[in-house]
Each structure stands twice: as structure tokens, then as C-alpha cells.
Image (cartoon, grey):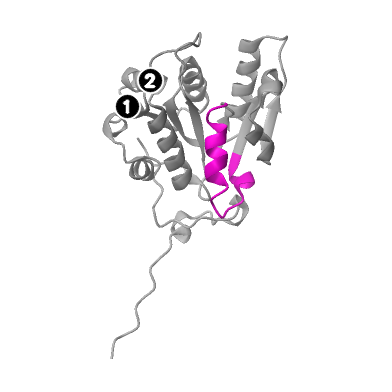
Amino acid sequence: MGQLNPSGAIFLSAGVPNPSAKHFVSEGDSAAISAAVSALLYVVLGRRQLVWGGHPAITPMVWAFATSMEVDYGAWVKLYQSAFFQDEFPEETAHFKNVVVTPKVAESLPESLLLMRQKMLDESNYAAAVFLGGMQGIFEEFELFKERSPSAAILPVMTTGGAAAKLGEQIDAEVGLASEYDYIALFHRLLEIDPNERRYASPAVQPANVADRILRPTASPPSD
């Protein structure tokens, strides 16, 4: 994996697998998925823009964590939804200021989802994609993402189970993604975000040069 674009967004593809769903792939670990979402937000928010499609189980997790951070989450988080699910949006969707609702296509769920995903992956410049849990949509978003952002990092967190675990096996993912549960350390390392990087209220005030974002310890005064 080469050096990541420090100005690039992070794409999140995630979901909690439902064994009764038509597109179920394999069991997921809901606790691990929740922990990974929280860890990703802790590492990324105020430092990189996060983009995702509004999965009903994930959006409330993002909202709960985003509101605890002292940054303008509306500037750092971009949420895509398809109008096909207009009557099923999680109530937290209304709280986000940066929501893109794509139109229904001929009353077709597959075509409506495809349009949403195409717009979502075409309208930002990405440094990486993180895959957590999920079902068949994980594979569909992976293929679209890889096609549009071939130089970006692909990070299927296999310990969250579900389709992300299968995707990691398929692409022979980095070994830490299959074994590490310290998600904060994992994301700092693989997303190449220094733990000492400052958080900014919005991308508009963030320095372009990464070195200028790092919080340097102040020198201690000389002792007598």
C-alpha cells in the first residue's frame, strides 16, 4: 500500500448482517461492528471527511458518536440515501446537515441503489475505503469503489464478520485486518493518521500540509 492522500475522504461501507435477509452472506459480530464504527469516527472525525450510505443500523451509531465530538460534523460527514427508502430513513438522518438524497429509478431497488452508489463514489476524492460487517452490498460497493478509486486503500475489517470477512479473504487483506481488535490503533496505522494530528472545526480551516496539523509538545521551562 502506497502513501495515502492526506486530503482524501474515507468511504465507509458497513452494515449489521441480518440472517433472515435475502442477501445475507455470513454472521457478523454486532459488538465488533459498533466498536469499529466508533473507533473509525474517533480517528477520522475532524481530520478527514467520512462518506457513507445510510444503513439503518449504522446511521444511529455515527450520530451518537459525532455529537460527542467538538467539531462541525456536518462539514466532516457526508451521508447518502436513496429516495427509494424515503419512508424508512432512521430518525437520526434528519440531524445530519450534509445529506444527499438520490432519486428512485423506475421503482427498482437495484437500480436506485446503483444510482446512489455511483453518485456517492463519484462525488468525492477518496484515500481509502473501510468495510465493516455487512451483506451482499459490501461486495457491490467494493467493486464500484475499486473501479473509481484504483489507488485508494481497501480495508475490510475481517474481525467484524459478515461480508467484510469474506471480502478480506477474497483480496488477501493485510494480516492485521483479520486479527486485531484494537481498532483505534489499527485505523491510525492503516489510514496513516498521526494520533497527534489536530482536529479542525471544518475542512476549510485545516492546513493542506499534514506536518502543519501535528500537535507538537511544548518545551518544558528550565528547572532552577
Q: Residues within 10 Å of mark 2 (few under 14, many from 20)?
A: many
Residue at point 61%, 11% (across, down): 110
Q: Are marks 2 and 1 in contact (CB under 8 Å)?
A: yes
Residue at point 42%, 31% (across, down): 33
| Quarter of the image with the C terminus in it | bottom left
Q: Percent x, y for residue 123? A: 62, 32
Q: Earlier in the sequence, mark 2 or mark 1?
A: 2
Examine the rendered structure and indicate whether residue 117 appears above or below residue 92: above
In this picture, which residue range is highlighted in magenta? 56-77
**In front here: 123 or 96?**
96
SS under mark 1 = loop
Q: Amino acid at mark 1?
A: Ala
Residue at point 68%, 31% (across, down): 100
Examine the rendered structure and indicate whether residue 9 appears above or below residue 16: below
- The answer to if 194 sits in the magenta stretch is no
Which label belongs to residue 48? none
Name the residue carrying label 1.
173
Name the residue carrying label 2.
167
